[in-house]
């Protein structure tokens, strides 16, 4: 292995140096490059360039790096804060193959390897000197001389009576030919992070710009609109999410100021004013995961429902849904979206504080669901609490929430509570947070699911557990050594022994 690596590594260093010279001079075949090709062709023990088959001379990352050098915008756009599209004009020299226009379609399939693969640039163009011919753009990093064609390609050219002679063509690149990442990398200070990703909310691109990107914010917004079909507005979050109404202040960077939008998620439609409610497209998978846990006939309490991404799919699954949100705008759009998705008869909607909802409508319904006739009940009860910044604090509302004889352990409600963690062991941290509020161990009856990475060293997680009867029922004294625990949930870590202490909840 060491013997093979040394010549290849040496070759790669040679190619890297010479490729830089090509970029700087914008010449197709400098003398030094020709000389290198000739030497490699004669050198024993190293593959022949003009006879290579499936072996790649460079790793893909190196090809990408060189491609970005040749097809990068002009250097004088560095530091631009107001977008000037005309400043992105640039001329590069590209190898081309002249062919008769009637055989282009047949030939281009056979030259897939050799042809230029660059989004936004046509591989076949008209010949300015001969209207009966066409020019096939070739890859400038693969095609240097006539010998750059592989044997099979030369055979096809011979069959179609096409000369393998490679010519040069001066290709003019414009703003339209560059990708958003290439434009921003050329504009922003060298070496700094480039924003090329965003959350798409209907026609809105939602960005979270860093401090060093703020001087370029309007240019970045316009580039996102230009390069992403269907995006007509770009916004930047300018403060953290308000924990009361779960919305945030935003600045329109470019495009229209209309924040009324429409999105599709998991085959459901949602409409809302993005500036006044909470919506995160990155939670689509989590919405689907919870929905899949539900069975027809189950009961779902959505404590912080937003505009309905948990409630509406559950209702469509023939579950009975109680959905609540404190934000009046979320409440309004939740009602609207229930009608829009034709589940308004299956969802009871509330506009209450989360704790008031738990101690009011949820408590009343649980008294019925878990009452004397609960043994005949076959469906499950689920409580979703998606307010990661504060939801765990609301778990205290379950203490002594109900009175009377406790129901069977398998009928106890299942809670799905979301939280953030910056701890080195986030799953353990979230469990300990929940245990601290409830005052009881959740080792046996809980599991923790990693939802997503929110920021460096910050995770969003969901802890799922059945509410212990000792917590849920008033004036219950439970000997944990003898009582029947809720069935253990599937865990992502090793369960510990349940505490054998007596717990009294008043």
Image (tube, grey):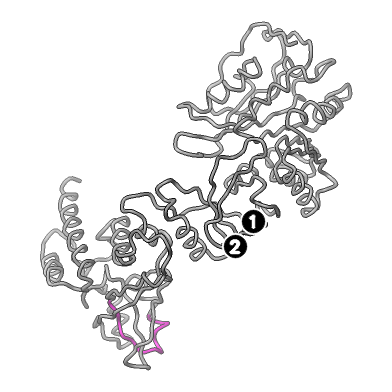
Seen from the viewer's position, the closer of residues 252 and 11 is 252
Q: Is residue 357 above or below residue 98?
A: above
Seen from the viewer's position, the closer of residues 154 and 319 is 319
SS for dot 2:
loop
Q: Is residue 103 magenta?
A: yes
Q: Position of residue 372 (x, y in %)?
A: 88, 21
The mark found on residue 334 in the picture is none
Q: Position of residue 214 (x, y in %)?
A: 44, 51
Q: Is residue 427 magenta?
A: no
Crowding at mark 2 (Cα within 10 Å: few <14, some 14-19, many 20+): some
Quadrant position of residue 506: top right
Residue assigned mark 1: 259
Q: Residue at x 78, y 35 (%)?
A: 299
Question: Is 401 situated left or right of 56 in this image?
Answer: right
Quadrant position of residue 303: top right
Q: Is residue 245 above or below residue 375?
A: below
Q: Which residues are magenta?
A: 95-107
Question: Is 55 situated left or right of 325 in this image?
Answer: left
Q: Is residue 68 above or below residue 296?
A: below
Q: Is residue 427 above or below residue 163?
A: above
Q: Position of residue 370 (x, y in %)?
A: 83, 24
Crowding at mark 1 (Cα within 10 Å: few <14, some 14-19, many 20+): some
The answer to whether mark 2 and mark 1 are in CB contact below 8 A is: no
Q: Position of residue 463 (x, y in %)?
A: 61, 29
Question: Is 298 situated left or right of 42 in this image?
Answer: right
Quadrant position of residue 100: bottom left
Seen from the viewer's position, the closer of residues 331 and 428 is 331
Q: Residue at x 79, y 48 (%)?
A: 335
Q: Residue at x 39, y 62 (%)?
A: 183
SS for dot 1:
loop
Residue assigned mark 2: 256
Q: Disc 2 and disc 1: Cα gap in Å?
A: 8 Å
């Amino acid at each position: 292995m060491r013997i093979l690596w040394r010549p290849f590594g040496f070759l790669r260093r040679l190619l890297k140096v010479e490729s830089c010279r090509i970029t700087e001079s914008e010449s197709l075949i400098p003398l030094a490059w020709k000389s290198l090709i000739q030497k490699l062709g004669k050198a024993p023990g190293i593959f022949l360039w003009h006879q290579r088959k499936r072996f790649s001379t460079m790793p893909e990352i190196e090809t990408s790096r060189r491609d970005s050098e040749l097809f990068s915008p002009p250097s004088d756009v560095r530091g631009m804060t107001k977008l000037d599209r005309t400043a992105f004009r640039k001329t590069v020299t590209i190898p081309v193959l002249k062919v008769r226009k009637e055989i282009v379609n047949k030939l281009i399939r056979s030259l897939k390897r050799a042809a230029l693969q660059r989004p936004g640039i046509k591989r076949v163009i008209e010949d300015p000197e001969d209207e009966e011919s066409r020019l096939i753009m070739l890859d400038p990093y693969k095609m240097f001389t006539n010998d750059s064609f592989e044997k099979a390609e030369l055979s096809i050219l011979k069959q179609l009576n096409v000369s393998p002679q490679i010519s040069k063509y001066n290709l003019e690149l414009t703003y339209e030919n560059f990708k958003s990442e290439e434009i921003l990398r050329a504009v922003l200070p060298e070496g700094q992070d480039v924003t090329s990703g965003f959350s798409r909310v209907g026609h809105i691109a939602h960005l979270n710009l860093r401090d060093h990107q703020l001087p370029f914010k309007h240019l970045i917004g316009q580039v996102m609109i230009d390069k992403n079909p269907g995006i007509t507005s770009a916004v930047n979050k300018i403060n953290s999410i308000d924990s009361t109404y779960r919305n945030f202040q935003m600045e329109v960077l470019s495009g229209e100021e209309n924040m009324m939008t429409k999105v599709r998620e998991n085959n459901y439609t949602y409409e809302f004013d993005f500036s006044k409610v909470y919506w995160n497209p990155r939670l689509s998978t989590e919405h689907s995961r919870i929905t899949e846990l539900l069975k027809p006939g189950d009961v779902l309490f959505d404590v912080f429902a937003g505009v309905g991404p948990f409630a509406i799919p559950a209702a469509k699954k023939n579950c009975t849904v109680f959905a609540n949100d404190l934000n009046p705008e979320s409440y309004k759009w939740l009602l609207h979206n229930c009608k829009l998705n034709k589940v308004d008869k299956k969802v009871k909607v509330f506009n209450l504080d989360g704790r008031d909802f738990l101690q009011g409508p949820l408590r009343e319904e649980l008294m019925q669901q878990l009452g004397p006739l609960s043994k005949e009940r076959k469906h499950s009860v689920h409580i979703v609490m998606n307010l990661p910044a504060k939801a765990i604090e609301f778990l205290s509302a379950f203490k002594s929430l109900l009175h009377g004889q406790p129901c069977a352990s398998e009928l106890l409600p299942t809670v799905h509570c979301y939280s953030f963690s910056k701890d080195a062991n986030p799953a353990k941290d979230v469990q300990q947070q929940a245990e601290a509020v409830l005052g009881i161990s959740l080792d046996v009856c809980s599991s923790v699911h990693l939802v997503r990475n929110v920021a460096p060293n910050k995770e969003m997680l969901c802890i799922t557990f059945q509410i212990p009867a000792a917590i849920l029922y008033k004036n219950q004294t439970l000997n944990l050594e003898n009582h029947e625990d809720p069935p253990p949930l599937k865990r992502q870590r090793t369960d510990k022994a349940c505490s054998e202490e007596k717990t009294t909840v008043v």
